């Protein structure tokens, strides 16, 4: 079935001339070169070596070899008419020990990437932290150690001083909910820590760092656009029974409100699971958690349906998996639910403190295959069109939304899922590093023409 939408209905003019179109990536997922040119170890370098942690025993040591082939991929971005490129900096390339000694080769590398973008007319958007903490800092407790506020601000200042004269758009962090939840509570992402004793301090310190990072950028780069990004999913209760509705509210607080509200000066959401955080909150912290970001990046893939669950500790709620609901899903098992992005825009637009919103990630994984030199991915085209239709719906109803970035440019290392899910609009053969623009990539290029 062809579910794609004709271009006469969906075209970029409808979003306005100022709307920022882009594509997003992250250092660890594309760069490879995990120990090149003086780079220090990151928590993912260590985590990937542990048995059973990554699908198929995969690792990111080569990934898409973006570190060496960045020119080729930036050329492709240009060819696809994509004006904005979001990528992250690997902290341990710049500061191999996390703090102190600076690795000039790391700084030179990112300067080359940024310069090449600018030469090609592609605007670089930098994420400072996309989950690859230097291992040297993890050995001192990582995000559970309050000293991370000093470590992080030192790193942010170095980035601002090294790249600030060329880069206008900055994102302090990528999805703190995911790296604290998966990395410090469930232990399924690096560094593989578990339990509230790790999660709660990690949450508080990540929030402090987001605000502190924002302040460092503002001080050093008064003309920069400073943001940070959040994962968010529209949450719905499984039924209208009070206990399901309340369970859904708790999950919404945890997944969608936990980080944005303290940043906006509203404090952490009231949740019994967060009670234990009090002991990490020192006098003056409530004020330090606030920062007036120029923009907020929202990243949406799906919605979640939530049911009350007596046996789930702390939160007494569970997610009803999409596969049990007989709905269309992506290769990640996530429901394809375009309205989610509309509801999320509505939800975040209801915070009067938020000035500007960019959708800094949205996309889908499907089991794409290369046949006769082509990759046909109509599901991804339909996904993008349907989500964009919902973005437009929100925009036409008066919601603030200023841009949309597809996740992602090339198939890449999808964290604990290894190379199994393919999210790119460009296909990668990981043996040969050959790239083939998928039909979705050609569609995006046409759309952006
Ligand atoms: C986001 C994350 C990306 C990417 C994507 C698809 O949560 O920021 O790094 O992995 O999901 O799962």
Image (spheres, rainbow, N blue to C red):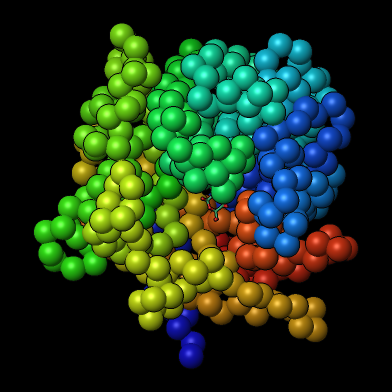
In the displayed structure, 116 sits above or below 327; it is: above
- The residue sitting at the front extreme is 311
**Quarter of the figure with residue 121:** top right
In the displayed structure, 251 sits above or below 434; it is: above
Q: Position of residue 356 (x, y in %)?
A: 35, 39
**Quarter of the figure with residue 253:** top left
Q: Is residue 75 visible?
A: no
Give left or right: position of 296 versus 156: left
Give left or right: position of 269 versus 443: left
| Camera-side residue of 54 and 259 | 54
Task: Identify the residue at image location x=23%, y=28%.
Answer: 266
Indicate the quadrant containing the C terminus: top left, top right, bottom left or bottom right: bottom right
Task: Identify the residue at image location x=63%, y=75%.
Answer: 367
Q: Position of residue 362 (x, y in %)?
A: 48, 57
Task: Identify the residue at image location x=24%, y=37%.
Answer: 271
Q: Position of residue 265 (x, y in %)?
A: 26, 25
In the displayed structure, 390 sits above or below 87; it is: below
Task: Identify the residue at image location x=70%, y=23%.
Answer: 136
Q: Is residue 140 visible?
A: yes
**Quarter of the figure with residue 78:** bottom right
| Camera-side residue of 282 and 218 | 282
In the displayed structure, 16 sits above or below 348; it is: below
């Amino acid at each position: 079935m062809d579910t794609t939408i004709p271009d006469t209905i969906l075209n970029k003019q409808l979003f306005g001339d100022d709307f920022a179109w882009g594509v997003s990536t992250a250092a660890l997922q594309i760069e490879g070169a995990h120990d090149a040119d003086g780079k220090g170890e990151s928590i993912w370098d260590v985590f990937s070596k542990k048995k059973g942690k990554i699908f198929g025993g995969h690792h990111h040591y080569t990934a898409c070899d973006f570190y060496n082939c960045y020119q080729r991929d930036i050329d492709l971005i240009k060819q696809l008419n994509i004006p904005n490129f979001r990528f992250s900096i690997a902290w341990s390339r710049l500061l191999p020990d996390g703090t102190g000694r600076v690795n000039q080769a790391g700084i030179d590398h990112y300067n080359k990437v940024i310069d090449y973008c600018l030469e090609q007319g592609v605007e670089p958007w930098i994420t400072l932290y996309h989950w690859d903490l230097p291992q040297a800092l993890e050995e001192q407790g990582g995000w559970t150690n309050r000293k991370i506020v000093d470590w992080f601000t030192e790193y942010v200042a170095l980035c601002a001083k090294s790249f600030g004269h060329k880069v206008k758009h900055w994102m302090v962090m990528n999805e703190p909910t995911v790296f604290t939840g998966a990395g410090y509570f469930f232990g399924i992402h690096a560094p593989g820590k578990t339990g509230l004793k790790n999660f709660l301090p990690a949450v508080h310190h990540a929030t402090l760092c987001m605000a502190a990072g924002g302040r460092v950028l503002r001080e050093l780069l008064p003309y920069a656009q400073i943001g940070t990004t959040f994962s968010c999913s529209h949450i719905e209760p499984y039924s209208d029974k009070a206990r399901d509705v309340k369970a859904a509210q708790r999950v919404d607080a945890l997944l969608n409100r936990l980080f944005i509200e303290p940043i906006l000066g509203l404090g952490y959401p009231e949740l019994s699971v967060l009670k234990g955080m009090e002991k990490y909150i020192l006098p003056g912290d409530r004020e330090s958690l606030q920062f007036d970001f120029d923009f907020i990046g929202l990243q949406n893939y799906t919605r979640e349906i939530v049911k009350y669950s007596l046996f789930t500790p702390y939160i007494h709620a569970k997610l009803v998996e999409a596969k049990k609901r007989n709905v269309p899903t992506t290769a990640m098992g996530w429901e394809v639910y375009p309205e989610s992005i509309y509801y999320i825009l509505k939800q975040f637009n209801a915070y009067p403190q938020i000035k500007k919103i960019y959708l800094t990630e949205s996309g889908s994984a499907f089991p794409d295959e290369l046949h006769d030199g082509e990759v046909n991915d109509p599901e991804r085209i339909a996904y993008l069109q349907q989500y964009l239709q919902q973005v437009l719906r929100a925009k036409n109803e008066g919601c603030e939304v200023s841009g949309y970035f597809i996740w992602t440019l090339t198939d890449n290392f999808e964290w604990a899922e290894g190379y199994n899910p393919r999210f790119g609009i460009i296909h990668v053969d990981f043996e040969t590093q050959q790239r083939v623009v998928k039909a979705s990539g050609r569609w995006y290029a046409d759309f952006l023409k």
